[in-house]
C-alpha cells in the first residue's frame, strides 16, 4: 500500500496553508472579474463583492466543520463520501466523484487561463518577451515546483502571497483616497438594478472558486483539524476584505463605463491615480497573484485526482506517492492539462477556455451548495460526531445559516449564463456515466479510520 497511497508529507503549517488559500483566491479573480462584473453592477460593484463574500463565508463554515471531522486529501471528495454514504453508499460515492471531477476539470482548465494572464503582465514589464512564449514556460516551471515537494511549494507560495496582499492593499487605499465617496456620487447607483448586482455576484465566483484549495491538502497539513478550518476562514476573510476595498476603489478612481470597456481595469484605475508607477505596482501584484493562483489550481486538482485514484475511482496510477511524499503522477497529469489549455489560450482558443471557466463558476456554486447540504446531513445522520469547529448559530442540532447558504448558492446559480451552465451540467452527466461504467465496481472504499492509519 505504501507505494500507492498514503505516506504524504506533513510539511504545511498554518501560515503555509493560509498563503495557499489567499494566493489561490486572489489570483483567480481580482484581475479578471472586475471588468465583466462592473459592466453588470456599475458603481455598486463593491456591493456585489460584499454579497459574494457573505455567501462564500457562510459556505466556508460548512467546509470548516467538515474539514475538522475529516481532514483528508481531496476535501469535498472525502466530505461528500462520508456525509452521504449513510443514506446510500452509491450516493456518497457518486457525489464524491462529482466533486472530484468538477474540481479537477474546473481548475485544470482555469490554470491555463491564469497562466496566460501571468504572461500578459510579464510582457508589460518585459515587452520583448511575447506572452505566447512566457505562458507555457510558466506552466512548466510551476508544475516543476510542485514536483519538488510540498514544503518548497509552500514557502514560495507564502512569499508571493504576502507580496500580493500588501500590493493590493496599497492599491485599494490609494484608489479610495483619490475620491473617498466615488461610488456614491453617481446619479444612478444601480444602472441595471439588483439583477445586475446579482449577475455580477455570480461572476465574482471565479475569484472565490478556490475557497476549497487549502482543504484539499488535509494530509499534508500539520495539526490539520485546527489549522485547516482556521487557515481557510482567515484566508477567505483576508481576500473578501481586499475584494471589497478594491471594488470600491476602482469605481472611485474611474467611471464604471470606462472600466467595463478596459481590458485591464485595475491598471486603468491605478494609471489614473498614480501615472507610471501605478502600472508597475499593478504588474507586480498581478504576477505574484496569478502565479499563486496557478499553484492553487495545480495543488487542488492534483490532490482531488489523487484522492479518487487511491480508491480506484479513477486509474490507480494517479494515486501513487513518491518516496519524498509527492503524488507525482497526479501532478504530472494536472500539469499536462494545464499546459495544453495554456497553449490553447495562447494560440487562438481563448474563447473556448473562457466558456470552460464559466462552467467552472457553475461547478463552484453547485459544490458550495452540496457542502452546505452535507453538513446538515451529517448533523442529522451522525449526531455522535464531535467537530472541533462547529458551524455557528444552531437551532437544536441544525445549522440554520447553512440552510440559508444552500438556498443562496442555488439562487445565484440561476444567474450563471445558460451556455456555461449547460457545459457544467454535461460535465456532471459525463462523471455520472464514468461512475457507473468504471468506478462503481472497482471502488476500494477507505473508511476514515483506514485513512488515518495511512498517515501515521
Image: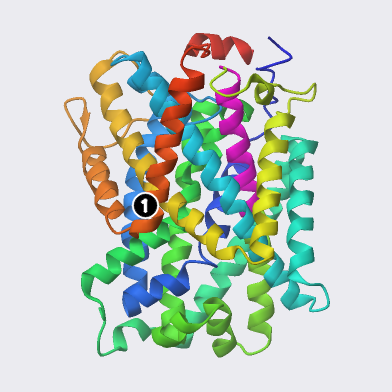
Instruction: Residue 442: say if magenta.
Output: no
Residue 89: % across, % down? 36, 14
Residue that mark 1 sits on: 421
Residue 57, relative to residue 220: is it above or below?
A: below
Secondary structure beneath label 1: helix
Residue 144: % across, % down? 79, 43
Q: In which quarter of the image is residue 249?
A: bottom left
Q: Is residue 388 visible?
A: no
| Residue projecting furthest to the right | 128
Residue 5, relative to residue 168: is it above or below?
A: above
Q: Is residue 407 visible?
A: yes
Color style of the picture:
rainbow
Which residue is more in the foreground, 245 or 435? Answer: 435
Which residue is more in the foreground, 299 or 51? Answer: 299
Query: Which residue appears at 37% of the width and 85% of the height?
Result: 182
Q: In which quarter of the image is residue 146?
A: top right
Query: Which residue appears at 68% of the width and 88% of the height?
Result: 276
| Residue projecting furthest to the left | 395
Instruction: Residue 299: say if magenta.
Output: yes
Residue 281: % across, % down? 66, 75
In which quadrant will I find the C terminus? top right
Looking at the image, residue 221 sits to the left or right of residue 365; the answer is: right
Looking at the image, residue 227 sits to the left or right of residue 255; the answer is: right
How would you classify the magenta stretch by its main secondary structure?
helix
Residue 444: % across, % down? 53, 11
Residue 402, relative to residue 419: is it above or below?
A: above
Residue interval drawn in magenta = 293-311
Q: How many labels does the image show?
A: 1
In which quadrant will I find the N terminus? top right
Amino acid at each position: 500500500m505504501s507505494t500507492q497511497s498514503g505516506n504524504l508529507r506533513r510539511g504545511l503549517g498554518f501560515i503555509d496553508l493560509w498563503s495557499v488559500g489567499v494566493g489561490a483566491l486572489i489570483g483567480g479573480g481580482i484581475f479578471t472579474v472586475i471588468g465583466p462584473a462592473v459592466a453588470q453592477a456599475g458603481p455598486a460593484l463593491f456591493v456585489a463583492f460584499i454579497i459574494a463574500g457573505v455567501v462564500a463565508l457562510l459556505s466556508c463554515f460548512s467546509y470548516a466543520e467538515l474539514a475538522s471531522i475529516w481532514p483528508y486529501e481531496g476535501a469535498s471528495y472525502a466530505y461528500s463520501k462520508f456525509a452521504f454514504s449513510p443514506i446510500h453508499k452509491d450516493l456518497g460515492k457518486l457525489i464524491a466523484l462529482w466533486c472530484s471531477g468538477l474540481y479537477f476539470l474546473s481548475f485544470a482548465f482555469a490554470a491555463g487561463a491564469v497562466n496566460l494572464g501571468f504572461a500578459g503582465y510579464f510582457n508589460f514589464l518585459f515587452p520583448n518577451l511575447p506572452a505566447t512564449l512566457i505562458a507555457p514556460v510558466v506552466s512548466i516551471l510551476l508544475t516543476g515546483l510542485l514536483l519538488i515537494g510540498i514544503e518548497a511549494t509552500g514557502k514560495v507560495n507564502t512569499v508571493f502571497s504576502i507580496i500580493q496582499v500588501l500590493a493590493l492593499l496599497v492599491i485599494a487605499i490609494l484608489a479610495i483616497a483619490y475620491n473617498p465617496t466615488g461610488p456614491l456620487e453617481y446619479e444612478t447607483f444601480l444602472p441595471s438594478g439588483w439583477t445586475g448586482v446579482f449577475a455580477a455576484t455570480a461572476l465574482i465566483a471565479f475569484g472565490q472558486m478556490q475557497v476549497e484549495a487549502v482543504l484539499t491538502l488535509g494530509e499534508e497539513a500539520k495539526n490539520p483539524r485546527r489549522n485547516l478550518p482556521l487557515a481557510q476562514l482567515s484566508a477567505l476573510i483576508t481576500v473578501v476584505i481586499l475584494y471589497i476595498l478594491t471594488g470600491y476603489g476602482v469605481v472611485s478612481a474611474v467611471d464604471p463605463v470606462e472600466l467595463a470597456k478596459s481590458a485591464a481595469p485595475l491598471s486603468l484605475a491605478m494609471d489614473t491615480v498614480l501615472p507610471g508607477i501605478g502600472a508597475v505596482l499593478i504588474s507586480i501584484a498581478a504576477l505574484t497573484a496569478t502565479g499563486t493562483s496557478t499553484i492553487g489550481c495545480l495543488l487542488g486538482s492534483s490532490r482531488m485526482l489523487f484522492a479518487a485514484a487511491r480508491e480506484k475511482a479513477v486509474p490507480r496510477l494517479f494515486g501513487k506517492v513518491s518516496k519524498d511524499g509527492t503524488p507525482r503522477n497526479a501532478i504530472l497529469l494536472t500539469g499536462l492539462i494545464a499546459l495544453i489549455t495554456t497553449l490553447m489560450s495562447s494560440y487562438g482558443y481563448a474563447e473556448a477556455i473562457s466558456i470552460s471557466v464559466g462552467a467552472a463558476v457553475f461547478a463552484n456554486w453547485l459544490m458550495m451548495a452540496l457542502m452546505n447540504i452535507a453538513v446538515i446531513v451529517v448533523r442529522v445522520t451522525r449526531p455522535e460526531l464531535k467537530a472541533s469547529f462547529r458551524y455557528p448559530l444552531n437551532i437544536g442540532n441544525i445549522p440554520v445559516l447553512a440552510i440559508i447558504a444552500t438556498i443562496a448558492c442555488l439562487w445565484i446559480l440561476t444567474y450563471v449564463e445558460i451556455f456555461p451552465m449547460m457545459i457544467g451540467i454535461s460535465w456532471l452527466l459525463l462523471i455520472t456515466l464514468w461512475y457507473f461504467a468504471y468506478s462503481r465496481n472497482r471502488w476500494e472504499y477507505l473508511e476514515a479510520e483506514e485513512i488515518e492509519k495511512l498517515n501515521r
